[in-house]
Image: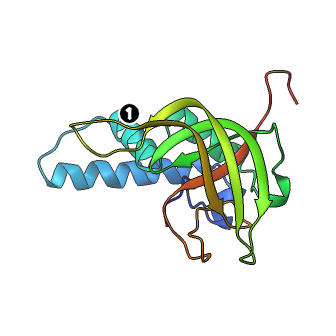
């Protein structure tokens, strides 16, 4: 399943979630060293954050510490969010949320703060800023039939610039 989630277990929530990330980064650094790839600890933290779909280490830590589970019932028109779209970390505003005929599947339209390139080619690009996608009740990307698939993941709701 493609998701921007950091997959933090309940045991990790009770302690500082950054400790889990640091342990993962340490294992990554060790695995790369076994392949004769030298990387600093800070570099492994950045790689770890990016592998989870975040822009950088600070963003990953901030989102992990917030640890606000998002459900489709929390979404609303005009609310700001952070998540991922086809492997790109994104933020934006929710334009609409509607139920589909498939139980547990919802259609969400969003406007991203920054356009993302959704084409994996060196010959051309395809930037998108307005996206319509299907999600389940946990705001994870699904196909029309409700099975897990690629797409938009809404991981947490953000406060507006006004603090709301």
For this rendering, which residue is in front, 74 or 16? Answer: 74
Q: Disc 1 on helix, strand or loop?
A: helix
Outermost residue toward the left in this view? 36
Specify the color scheme. rainbow
Q: Position of residue 114 (x, y in %)?
A: 54, 28
- 89 to 134, vertically: above or below: above
Outermost residue toward the top in this view? 162
For this rendering, which residue is in front, 88 or 97? Answer: 97
Query: Which residue is rendered at x = 78% and y = 54% of the image?
Result: 97
**Residue for badge 1:** 42
Compared across the picture, whether 93 is left or right of 115 comes to: right
Compared across the picture, whether 134 is left or right of 27 comes to: right
Query: Which residue is rendered at x = 64% and y = 42% of the image?
Result: 63
- Give the quarter of the figure containing the C terminus: top right
Outermost residue toward the front in this view? 101
Compared across the picture, whether 130 is left or right of 118 comes to: right
- Occupied quadrant, residue 119: top left
């Amino acid at each position: 399943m493609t998701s921007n989630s950091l997959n933090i277990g309940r045991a990790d929530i009770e302690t500082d979630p950054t400790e889990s990330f640091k342990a993962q980064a340490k294992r990554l650094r060790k695995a790369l060293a076994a392949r004769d790839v030298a990387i600093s600890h800070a570099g492994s933290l950045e790689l770890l954050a990016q592998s989870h779909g975040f822009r950088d280490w600070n963003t990953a830590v901030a989102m992990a510490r917030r640890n606000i589970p998002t459900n489709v019932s929390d979404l609303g028109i005009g609310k700001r969010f952070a998540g991922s779209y086809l492997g790109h970390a994104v933020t934006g505003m929710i334009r609409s949320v509607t139920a589909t005929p498939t139980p547990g599947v919802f259609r969400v339209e969003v406007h991203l703060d920054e356009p993302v390139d959704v084409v994996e080619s060196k010959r051309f690009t395809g930037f998108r800023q307005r996206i319509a996608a299907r999600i389940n009740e946990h705001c994870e990307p699904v196909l029309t039939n409700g099975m897990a698939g690629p797409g938009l993941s809404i991981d947490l709701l953000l406060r507006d610039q006004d603090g709301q």
